[in-house]
């Protein structure tokens, strides 16, 4: 089959996936499998080979990241049940103060809390951010909402153990330790620069509280009314209804934040927080250590074993489970695990069928065709994968689907032109962040939980995360000159 026919069939397959999801409201899993089948059959693979490629692609990526995603989500579910996020935000407030909280919160969410399912992390952290907003000033709501949006979305695709980052690493065969290190190098400046840009815009007239914020009573507690709770150092307040939420929902997620004046209590609470997060931190440290030793060509059997991502996350999961039993009891740990299994199911299936489409694209020889055009140019494929992921995200509204699909198209190019696959993974992740809008659940959750109008959410979420997307690719391009 001619190269032109393969290019046309690939374009039709990807377009058909988008059309089925957007126009005909098919499930993304079904759409991706149909697109894979069409591409295989029309590009000369034949019936048997097409089915085999789809099944093998699903199985290969599950073998790479299936357990990793499951372990990460389960760990996050238990941390959520133990109230680790509330305690962490309270500690950040004490350490950095209100004015620096947008940076502290966004960087912490992007780097440390990605094992927690995105929607759950948002529902827990948004009420805390909303309570902090009045302390920051007139633009507090805008700055905190933007910080949340940027931290959440960047972390999921750029930082291990975010489910998008895990899927991209598995799809492109990137060692997880390498993905962790490169993601960390990229996500910290991306988040910090993006939050700074948006803060500058907001403080120079781009935010109108009268038009961009919903007017309701904030759940704020005066310092003299604050009373630290026994388990987190954060006092609970009586929540008022937020647009789009019931009082019961507000009671479950609304927590007021006040630094306590009792130094002994502060020390105890921060000590407890370190204990809660210790297994997760140990897991990430082990993975990073393995990657560093691999780069240095140093080998030790014991370290090699425990630094394997699967074993490192298993150690973290066991440690978190043990701490959970001591702090919240076996019943609540089992409840959290059941919730984690429910959350991870859809992620695993979607990731797997994304691998099926990528495997089919590789099998029809698209990599050889594109490699002829790109030659030794590293910038062109990175820009192409960014643009493709951005376009797919605008159409489909799913960060994960757009990143996996775009990376799958360009994955075969990397070995041909000597481009490090981790750069393609990061470029696909960066592109998938562009234009988070009304098709995204994150958009509407941020609107209701942060008390914004649709106009305000378009500024904080859509524009804010798009700025992060552009900043990320502008940082990735220079990286390609050295790696």
Image: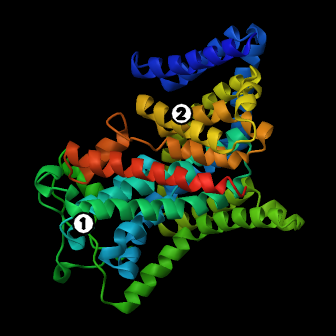
SS of the residue under disc 2: helix
Is 237 left, or right, of 471 in this rendering? Answer: left
The quarter holding residue 361 reads top right
Front disc: 1 or 2: 2
Q: How far apart are labels 1 and 2 at the CA level? A: 36 Å
Q: Which residue shows up at 46% across the image and 44% down it?
A: 433
Front-most of 354 and 390?
Answer: 390
Q: Which residue shows up at 62% across the image and 36% down it?
A: 407
The residue under label 1 is 133
Q: Which residue shows up at 77% across the image and 63% down it?
A: 290
SS of the residue under disc 1: helix
Question: Residue 388, which numbered label?
Answer: 2
Quick check: 76 above or below 323?
above
Q: Position of residue 430 (x, y in %)?
A: 52, 47
Q: Position of residue 251 (x, y in %)?
A: 24, 57
Which badge, 1 or 2, comes first in the chain's sequence? 1
Residue 121 seen from this side: no
Q: Which residue shows up at 73% across the image and 35% down it?
A: 413
Q: Position of residue 338 (x, y in %)?
A: 51, 45
């Amino acid at each position: 089959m001619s190269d032109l026919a393969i290019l046309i069939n690939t374009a039709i397959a990807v377009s058909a996936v988008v059309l089925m999801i957007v126009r005909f409201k098919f499930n993304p899993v079904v759409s991706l499998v149909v697109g894979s089948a069409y591409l295989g059959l029309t590009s000369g693979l034949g019936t048997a080979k097409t089915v085999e490629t789809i099944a093998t692609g699903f199985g290969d990526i599950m073998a790479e990241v299936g357990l990793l995603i499951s372990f990460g989500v389960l760990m996050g579910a238990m941390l959520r049940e133990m109230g680790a996020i509330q305690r962490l935000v309270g500690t950040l407030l004490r350490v950095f103060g209100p004015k620096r909280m947008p940076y502290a919160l966004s960087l912490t969410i992007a780097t440390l809390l990605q094992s927690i399912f995105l929607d759950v992390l948002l529902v827990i952290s948004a009420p805390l951010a909303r309570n902090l907003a009045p302390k920051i000033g007139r633009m507090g709501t805008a700055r905190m909402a933007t910080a949340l949006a940027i931290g959440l979305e960047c972390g999921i695709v750029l930082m291990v153990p975010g489910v998008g980052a895990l899927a991209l690493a598995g799809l492109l065969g990137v060692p997880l330790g390498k993905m962790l290190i490169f993601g960390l190098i990229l996500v910290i400046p991306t988040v910090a620069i993006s939050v700074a840009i948006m803060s500058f815009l907001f403080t120079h007239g781009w935010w109108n509280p009268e038009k961009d914020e919903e007017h309701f009573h904030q759940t704020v507690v005066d310092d003299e009314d604050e009373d630290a709770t026994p388990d987190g150092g954060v006092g609970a307040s009586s929540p008022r209804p937020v647009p789009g939420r019931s009082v019961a929902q507000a009671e479950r997620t609304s927590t007021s934040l006040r630094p306590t004046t009792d130094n002994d209590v502060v020390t105890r609470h921060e000590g407890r927080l370190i204990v809660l997060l210790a297994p997760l931190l140990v897991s990430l440290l082990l993975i990073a250590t393995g990657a560093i030793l691999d780069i240095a060509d140093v080998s030790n059997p014991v370290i090699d074993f425990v630094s394997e991502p699967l074993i490192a996350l298993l150690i973290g999961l066991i440690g978190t489970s043990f701490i959970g039993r001591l702090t919240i009891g076996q019943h609540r740990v089992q409840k959290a695990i059941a919730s984690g299994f429910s959350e991870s199911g859809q992620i695993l299936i979607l990731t797997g069928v994304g691998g099926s489409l990528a495997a089919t694209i590789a099998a029809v020889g698209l990599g050889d065709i594109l490699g002829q055009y790109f030659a030794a140019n590293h910038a062109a494929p990175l820009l192409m994968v960014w643009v493709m992921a951005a376009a797919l995200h605008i159409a489909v509204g799913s960060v994960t689907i757009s990143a996996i699909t775009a990376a799958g198209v360009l994955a075969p190019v990397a070995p041909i032109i000597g481009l490090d696959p981790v750069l393609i993974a990061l470029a696909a992740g960066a592109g998938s962040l562009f234009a988070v809008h009304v098709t995204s659940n994150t958009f509407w959750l941020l609107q209701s939980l942060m008390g914004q109008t649709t106009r305000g959410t378009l500024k904080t979420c859509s524009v804010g995360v798009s700025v992060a997307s552009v900043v990320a690719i502008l940082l990735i391009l220079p990286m390609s000159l050295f790696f």
